[in-house]
Structures are given as C-alpha cells and as structure tokens.
Image (cartoon, helix red, strand yellow):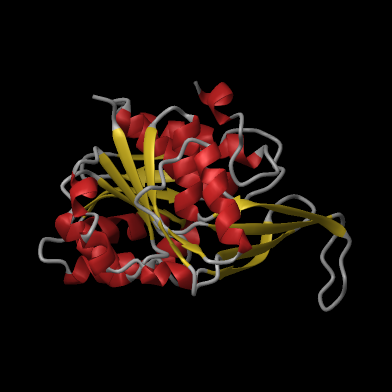
Amino acid sequence: METLISVIGGANIDLSATLFDAFIAADSNPGHVEIGYGGVARNIAHNLSLLGARTQLMTIFGGDLFGGLIQDYCKQQGIDIRLSERETALRTGVYLCINNHGGEMIAAVADTDAIRTITPEWLSKRSGDISQSDYVVADTNITEDSIRWLMENTTAPLFIDGVSSTKAHRVVNALRKAKLPYLHTLKVNLKEALAVTQTTTYAEAAQQLLNLGVAHVYITLGGDGVYCRNAAEEWLFPALPGDVVNTTGAGDAFLAGVVYAYAKGMDFPKTAQYGLMAARATLMSPKAVNPDIANILL
C-alpha cells in the first residue's frame, strides 16, 4: 500500500516583500511584493505532494475570500483536504514578511489565530485517519495541548516543525507534560533551538532536546547548513551552494525532504542531506514552494 503522510497545522496567504536596496527604517522602501500560498503545514504538504507522496492536510480555512482560494489551490496541487474544515466566522491566516535585497528575512508577522481551533477534541474526531498514517507531521501553530495529544495518541513516527522562537516552546512544554515523552523528529532553526533550551550552542541545545525525549534533532543553521543528532550519532552538513532568491519556506521544504527521505528508507545522515537539497530548491524560487522541486530532487 502507498505510504500515507498526514500533515497538521497552518495554511495561510503569504505576502512576501523583497527590497531592491538596503532597508531604510520608518520609510517607504522600493521593492517587489509576491503574493502566494503558504503556512508551514500547507507548505510541507505541498512539497510532499510534488515529490509524489500521498498526502492529507488537516487545517482550518477561514470563511473569507483567502480561505476559498487556498482550498481550491490545495485541490489543484493534489493535496487531500477532506479532513480539513472551513470556519465561516474565522479569517484566514496571513504571513507577512520583509526580505532584504539579498532575499534574507528582516522581519515577519504571522496571523494564525484560526489554527487555534485545532484542539485535542478536533484531532480526536480524526484519530482513525491519523492512526492509519505511516508518518504524521505537525507545526507548532497548533496549541500545546494539541501537540501533546499527538505525542500521546500517534502511533506513527511524529515529526514537528518549531515554526518560531515563540511557538517552539509548545513542543518542549508538551514533552514535559506528556505521559510518555517521546517525539521522533524535531526540526528547529538555531534561534528557536537556543530559545527553548536556554543554551548557547547548537550542540548543547540538541543534547537537551534529546534528554527531553526527542529521538532525532535537526537544527538548521541558515547559510551554515544543518546540525543533526540522535542518541548514536551527530552530523554537521554545510549548506548547498545556490543563488538565494527568497528564504520563505526553505525550512518547511527541509522538513518535507527529511520526511520524504525517511519514507524512502534513507538513513539518518542521508535524510539531513536530502532536506538540504529540498531547502536549496526552495531558496532558488520566489515562491514558498518551488513548483519544480521534483525535477530538482528526483
């Protein structure tokens, strides 16, 4: 039977502004604004679908125009959204970011209130479908209680994306409260890793996360690559060369690549390298998901 991957979390509209020149505070800066479809979970599901994986997305669409547009787009991309819902009283999430002229993010604002309605009760209604999954992926846009529910009720390997320094704390808190604290994979960037562990190096942060119950830790280091560690081995891989067009979605693509690699039976270091390949493909695209990722990776 074909591998089934369930992805749970945010879906939103991306507004990405890239400056033509150096940023000037408190002023109007010339640049290019890209409007696209995003959300960490949606991006991961989209990447996996493009790579040929059977993927189902569990999210909340708002009742506004954006919600309908994202629904239609997901269907066009072959993402199964039958387990998602559209809430007419909620507005669709929006992610707004400003990138410097080199494509690196300067600042961002994420309005993801709609995803708070993904509660343990909401998930429990879908427990049968979740239990049939071969892999489950979630982002920390969902609540701490919902993350804990997944840890305690998911039998398939569970992968979580830390999303941001603020939201990544939800994973650590859930691990500390879970009956049997265990998480197959956590992907965080360096800022998130140091924030949730109160450490000063990625190696120290990874060790703390392992002590909390994470089996495989991936700490992305931007232009310096990725540090990954489990109980038996640790690796530091440099970033792959390539022209950076836009950094939005690169971390999401990395985790999608890792999940896909596990589904294909690759070993721990190979999964990290495959994640780096997926991230590079996204960095070379103005969109949060590179529509040509399959041609680049497969």
For residue 124, side relative to residue 117 (left or right)? left
As drawn, which residue projects farthest toward the left?
179
Q: Residue furthest front?
A: 88
Residues 154 and 181: in front is: 154
Q: How many marks?
A: 0
Give the left or right position of residue 270, taking residue 62 as reference.
left
Q: Is residue 146 above or below residue 49?
A: below
Q: In the figure, residue 269 lies in which quadrant?
A: top left
Query: Image point 16% across, 67% down: which residue?
Result: 178
Looking at the image, is 154 positioned above or below residue 180? Answer: above
Q: Nearer the viewer, residue 185 or 90?
A: 90
Q: Residue at x 60, y 65 (%)?
A: 94
Q: Position of residue 131 (x, y in %)?
A: 18, 46
Q: Is residue 254 visible?
A: no
Q: Is residue 77 something that shows in the picture?
A: yes
Q: Residue 210 occupies which quadrant of the picture?
A: bottom left
Above or below, 193 relative to 34: below
Q: Left of 265 or right of it: where is 272?
A: right
Give the residue displayed 57% in from the left and 24% down from the top: 296
Residue drawn at (46%, 34%) of the image = 49
Residue 24 percent location from the top left of the image: 85, 70
Q: Quadrant of the N terminus?
A: top left
111 or 269, which is in the foreground?
111
Q: Is residue 151 above or below residue 264?
A: below
- Image position, residue 55 (x, y; %): 38, 38
Residue 69 percent coordinates (x, y): 60, 53
